[in-house]
Image: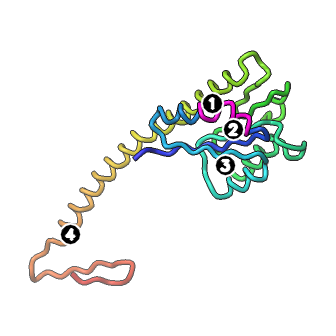
Amino acid sequence: MKLTYKILWVDDLIKDLINNGTKDDIQTHLEELEFSVTIDCYETRELAEDKLNNATYDLILSDYNIGSEENNGDKLIEWIRSNNIFTEILFYSAQKDFENALVGQDRISYFALYNDEGYRGFKEKVYELIGQTVRKFEELTPMRGFVMAETSILDSKVENLLSDYFSLDNNDTKEMTAISGTVVV
């Protein structure tokens, strides 16, 4: 069974990114990392917000120019953070000085498409963020193992205590107060 990696991508020109192979390249990169991949693409802030009300994502990609000024990517990201969604976000634009639009927002990476690297550099930035989120998961796996090991030790101790408590002579009677009342053993 493969783990699922989910990306929410918001861009009013998302069809261009699908047609030029950028989406497929990102999906292939994740599949090579042995993930089952879901990339949900939306052209408007409203559609993305609706989806975020019902789903969680490992990474969010958002263009700055996704509509009118009141519906731009910065408004989407403000909505995301105000709804306590702390997923990593890559905020990008071909417009200069867009980085200032979200100064002070947490966990947001910026990428300027107007530089010489364009979408090639953009994909590298996405791969970098994917690597960062995967490393967080890899750190979680050993922690889960540690917690499970400690839980097993605790289970064993509880089992021994209960066994000692309930191993009585035939003539002995003990009472144990339980949540539902008194139990006679």
Q: CB of mark 2 within 8 Å of CB of mark 4?
A: no
> What is the three-letter code of the residue carrying label 3?
Ile
What residue is at 29 percent from the left and 78 percent from the top? Answer: 176
Q: Which residue is mark 1?
A: 126
Q: Which residue is mark 3?
A: 85
Secondary element at image label 2: strand
**C-alpha distance separating marks 2 and 4:** 58 Å
Q: Residues within 10 Å of mark 4 (few under 14, many from 20)?
A: few
**C-alpha distance separating marks 3 and 2:** 14 Å
Instruction: Point out the frontmost of discs 1 and 3.
Output: 1
Secondary element at image label 4: helix
Q: Earlier in the sequence, mark 2 or mark 4?
A: 2
Instruction: Point out the frontmost of discs 2 and 4.
Output: 2
Reply yes or no: does residue 22 show up in magenta: yes
Secondary element at image label 3: loop
The answer to which quarter of the image holds residue 12 is top right
What residue is at 58 percent from the left and 28 percent from the top? Answer: 127
Secondary element at image label 1: helix
